[in-house]
Image (cartoon, rainbow, N blue to C red):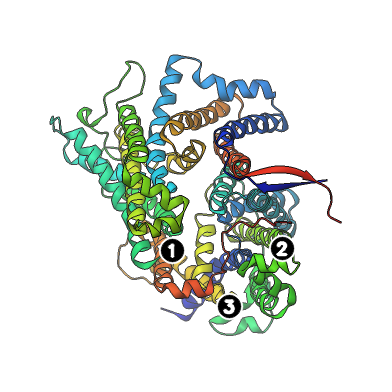
Amino acid sequence: MWLKFEQRPQPSSLMRYLSPLIAVGLMLASGMLLFYLLGKNPVAGFRVFFLNPVRDSYGVAELFLKATPLMLCAVGLSVGFRANVWNIGAEGQLLVGALAAGAVALHFPDSHSPFLLPGMVLAGALGGMLWAAIPAWLRTRFNANEILTSLMLVYVAQLMVSWLVHGPWRDPDGFNFPQTKMFQAKALLPILVEGTRVNAALFIAIGALILGWVFMNRSFMGYQMKVAGQAENAGRYAGFSAKRAIWLGMLVGGGMAGIAGMSEVAGPVGQITEHISPGYGFAAMIVAFVGRLSPIGIFFSSLLLALLYMGGEQAQQYLALPSSISNVFQGMLLFFLLASDVFINYRPRWVGRRK
Amino acid sequence: MGLSFLSSILFATVVAGTPLIIVALGELVTEKAGVLNLGAEGIMSVGAVAAFAVAHGTHSPGLGILAGMAAGVLMSLLFAIAALTLLANQVASGLALSIFGVGLAAFIGKPYESVALASVPPIVIPYLNRIPVLGPALFEQQGLVYFSWALIAAVAWFLYRTKAGLVLRAVGESPVSAHSIGYGVVGIRYQAVLFGGAMAGIGGAFLSVFYTPMWVEGMVAGRGWIAIALVVFATWRPMRVMVGAYLFGGCMVTQMFVQGSGARISVPSQFLSALPYLATVLVLVIISRNRSTIRLNSPASLGQPFLPDV
């Protein structure tokens, strides 16, 4: 007996939505196995990792705080992913957006203008778009693979941040720490709930999710992107421009990632340092896939990935495990998702051994 | 600029290019079978940390290499199950492997940070190493440097001079035809992916056991991705991988070059560190600009899943 897959007549929509849940279940099971193998009590490990972070209202607020950049990046990426535009450099676009927003904040240290924060959001979006425009241009003009170019630019962006905070932008009164001055109060996003860190960027993110939903489900352009991704030839036949899909996918992804960068430097970080993002741009790809590239799904999956980040911190504190265990969980989640996605298009069948 | 300085630049270039050659050749064989595995960065990371742990525990660099290789095979097996058996999107599966591998390596490697490993003496080839300038760069190197040259010859010979190589290329060009004349496409692709994983594991081992030698989180620093770009740059030909790898190797040691040349230009170190990444973008543009170059040279079924209908 061996397992065989046969194509379903049409993709199973039940499995499409069940698959992320299966993946989460498998991730939890292997996570507990991992705790066991590391000599920890699996149940206690589960509690520390998945329940501890959200046991009080401060924890829940932190969950939303960390989910915000993930939502922003993921909803932007999902536009491109639908059209098979593989922008995997959101992390770099996030950083450049943070730099652009930070430049505005640092340039107007005394401004009381109500346009300062909107200006920073705009600068962040433009910075991210600029960084994403490079792979888009190289792809449409020179046919260079956007996967590799967008990723290479992540490293370049990281080095650019490093150079700025070690050199020209370093706080002269900062005891030589590689960081800029703290942003002034008017350049910080307002806190939503007193006593927590959750800030107005959450509204921007939810607004982006709604806009993303309208774009994907109610606009002709969004429809074209879907067709371009699902049936390339049909898209071409209908005259949908592949180049436009690439530009749109990259720019939306970059712009959103840039706003996410802004939300970090004008939010919990409050300045530019070398540690603006713990890999939000990469985790957002997982968020987008687990959320089925749909804004509603992305909302929930960003909370899940935010929980994984927080669980890692808890595991470091209470289980003496490195916080990079979050990345292990993230990777497992994506793997399990991709594996269980097979059941969307195929159904398993046990068949007799071939003679 | 003295000759000894030139010699040390060449030496450093060869060392920096070696992991790229090994990893890129593994990726090349994988891609020749029609499979795009973007997980090299993750495999290298896990290979590096596994090799470091074993080399540290056993004091045997050789066992370290074997451990790196074994870790690479296991990691690529994950990819193969997802992409070949479960027919998942290869790009997404490769990304998953990269994210997972980098995270796993950081997790496993935590206790080994700040642990040093004794550096391994090079294997000196007598007499030849006394050739001026080139001698030390070519004949006073680690075993894996010589291995990388042998690997180029072996891969070229395998792909273009053996029947198995022909079959592998056929599977990459047209899996349907290969399947219909009785070759097990999925099985061959499995082997190609596992070979690629083994090489990426060895490449990682070279970094942590011979090159630095230590383990730091993020030490692979994009070399896995550069190796994948190198395969495109080499238009899927083994000999050109070597040329490209040394070009990139040279790029990576520019820092040393600038500092050693005594030139009084003050360039921030970050600019020099960014060079290999910018160079990668540049060569991709140059090679890809001509669409037919890519179309003629890339395996026709690259990235396409294959489901046998029997």
Q: Taking A353 as reference, is B242 above or below it?
A: below
Between label 3 and label 2, give the one nearer the viewer. Answer: 2
- Report the chain holding disc 2: B
- Residue type at the position of mark 3: Met
Judged from the image, the secondary structure of the residue bearing numbered disc 2 is helix
Choose between B180 and A69: the one closer to the eye. Answer: B180
Identify the residue at horizontal 57%, vertical 69% (top origin).
B299
Q: Which of B220 and B188 is in front in this view?
A: B188
Kind of residue at badge 1: Pro
Q: Mark 2 points at which residue?
A: B188
**Residue B239: mark:** 3
Graded by Cα atoms within 10 Å as few (under 14), some (14 to 19) or many (20 or more), the crowding at tag 1 reads many
Instruction: Return the residue at label 1.
Output: B276
A306 to B150, vertically: above or below: above
Residue A340 coordinates in the image, percent (x, y): 62, 40
Asked whether the beta carbons under mark 3 and mark 2 sit within 8 Å of each other, the answer is no
- The residue that appears at 51% across and 75% down in the rendered structure is B296
Circles 3 and 1, Cβ within 8 Å, touching? The answer is no
The disc, 3 or 2, on the residue closer to the chain's N-terminal end is 2
